[in-house]
Amino acid sequence: MDEYRFMTLREAPELKARAAAWFHSKWGVPEAAYLACMDAYLSGETDYGWYLCLDGNCIVGGMGVIDNDFHDRKDLSPNVCAVYTEEAYRRRAIAGRLLNMVVEDQRAKGISPLYLLTDHTGFYERYGWDFCCMALGEGEETPSRLYVHW
């Protein structure tokens, strides 16, 4: 794990454009949307952050925190979003370390609980997340699992 660098975007703001492009390539959300959220974070407008794992100069994992991750439960906020680890880097505890980093960083800023929308079962529970309810994602026909971390 020492070969990877875990950081917030505030620690490496020069990665903003690369990070927005990387997240866009994974989730299809417009780069401009990522850039707007990242700019708000970097300017101090919000403490909802962006978290990255790098192997050398390559982004291999990341996630963010936003008000709502495109679901119908607008009352359950903020949400961890855009959770992704490159396939070749999975099963190396990168996502788990990033999740723990997010929870600790947000809690230190007085932001708790956090919510997370996913289709996965069994993964997030390993990192202290509890099933909260089902939520319907925008454009989805079936609800997904919404987790909470206190």
Image (tube, helix red, strand yellow):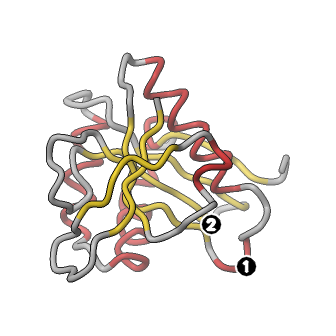
Residue drawn at x 19%, y 52% is: 36
- Residues marked 2 and 1 touching at CB (< 8 Å): yes
| 76 lies left or right of 83 | left
Task: Indicate whether 53 appears above or below 111.
Answer: below
User: Helix, strand or loop at disc 1?
Assistant: helix
- Lower sequence index among marks 2 and 1: 2
Residue drawn at x 26%, y 73% is: 29
Which residue is at the front of the view, 58 or 105?
105
Pinpoint residue 98: horizontal percent, then vertical percent: 60, 47
User: Helix, strand or loop at disc 2?
Assistant: strand
Which of the numbered marks, if any, corresponds to residue 67?
none
Task: Indicate whether 88 appears above or below 61.
Answer: below
| 146 lies left or right of 59 | left
Pinpoint residue 65: horizontal percent, then vertical percent: 35, 45
Which residue is at the front of the view, 37 or 134?
134
Residue type pointed to by label 1:
Ala
Residue drawn at x 52%, y 68% is: 120
**In terms of image quadrants, where is residue 55?**
bottom right
Pinpoint residue 33: horizontal percent, then vertical percent: 20, 62
Pointer 2 residue: 60
| Number of residues whose C-alpha sits closer than 10 Å to that of mark 1, classed few (under 14), some (14–19) or many (20 or more) | few
Which of the numbered marks, if any, corresponds to residue 88?
1
| Number of residues whose C-alpha sits closer than 10 Å to that of mark 2, classed few (under 14), some (14–19) or many (20 or more) | many
What whole-number distance in Å separates the C-alpha atoms at marks 2 and 1?
9 Å
| 101 lies left or right of 144 | right
| 88 lies left or right of 25 | right
